[in-house]
Amino acid sequence: REITPKGIGSFAVAPIPMGTIVATFGGTFLTEVDFETYPSERRNRSIQIDIDQFILGPESREPGDSINHSCSPNCQMRNATQLIAMRDIAVDEELTYDYATSDISQYDEFECACGSDNCRVRVTGNDWMNPELQSRYQNIFSPYVQRKIKAAQSARALTKRDVEVLMNSYDANPQQALTRALRIVTGMPNATWKSLVAQDSTALEDRELLYSADQSCLDQLAEQLNERRTI
Ligand SMILES: [Zn+2]
């Protein structure tokens, strides 16, 4: 249904009891490198389900794509791809969920027009880090965002001692030494090399080189980690 000023929205045509599945997001599985090649209109209809794993929505809009954000939502993610009613929803009520519970991408920032008392006004890709939202939404973040929150809580900068360990073990096995250091800075103690690189690296074009353990890229990463350490 058309609405101003949001454009288009989804409305209940029958009463929806709490817990009912209202949408299931599906589509094509992509890595971030492939995902970035699609236009933003298409990327807006997507969901990130893990580090370097995106589900891109189909070419044409589907009903679930029209569910707007609200800072006081009536729906929530049940798992990585399913949206359920978080309370009973009456006929003609607009279906909404808080995008911060599943979307942490920077390109999706917008001015919110939900009009609720606790409206954040500007919705950003960093809202999941907001302590107030974390306590309000505790268990209703998508599994991927919950893992991000947990990792962020245990992530820390390398100390001088950590860098010494990195440098001392570097020549024998650079990738293993870097894995240890990256596990500390990302707060992901069991993550694989690929996940660590995807999580930490900002330059997408360096990822493939790091995946294949390109020596000069490894050296560069070790240098960066050294520069980022605490005094
Ligand atoms: Zn709002």
Image (tube, grey):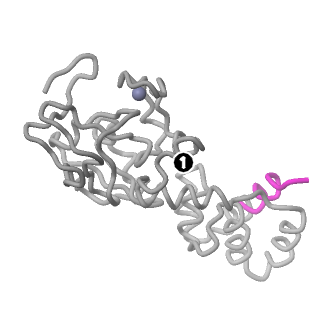
Quarter of the image for residue 50 reads bottom left
Which residue is pictured at 15% across the width and 22% down the height? Answer: 2
Which residue is pictured at 26% across the width and 57% down the height? Answer: 28
Which residue is pictured at 65% across the width and 63% down the height? Answer: 187
**Quadrant position of the N terminus in the picture:** top left
Q: Please tell me whether residue 224 is drawn above or below residue 193 in the rendered image.
A: above
- Asked whether residue 219 is drawn in magenta, I would say no
Task: Give the extent of the magenta segment.
Answer: 221-231
State the residue in front, 93 or 65. Answer: 93
Q: Seen in the image, is 42 located left or right of residue 122?
A: left
The residue where tag 1 is placed is 135
Quarter of the image for residue 229 reads bottom right
User: As shown in the figure, which amino acid type bears the numbered disc 1?
Assistant: Ser
State the residue in front, 169 or 77. Answer: 77
Which residue is pictured at 47% across the width and 45% down the height? Answer: 104
Q: Quadrant of ligand 1?
A: top left
Most extreme residue toward the top is 4
- Asked whether residue 230 is drawn in magenta, I would say yes
Q: Seen in the image, is 39 located left or right of residue 154?
A: left
Instruction: Give the percent coordinates (x, y) of residue 110.
Output: 42, 27
Query: Secondary structure of the magenta portion, mostly?
Result: helix
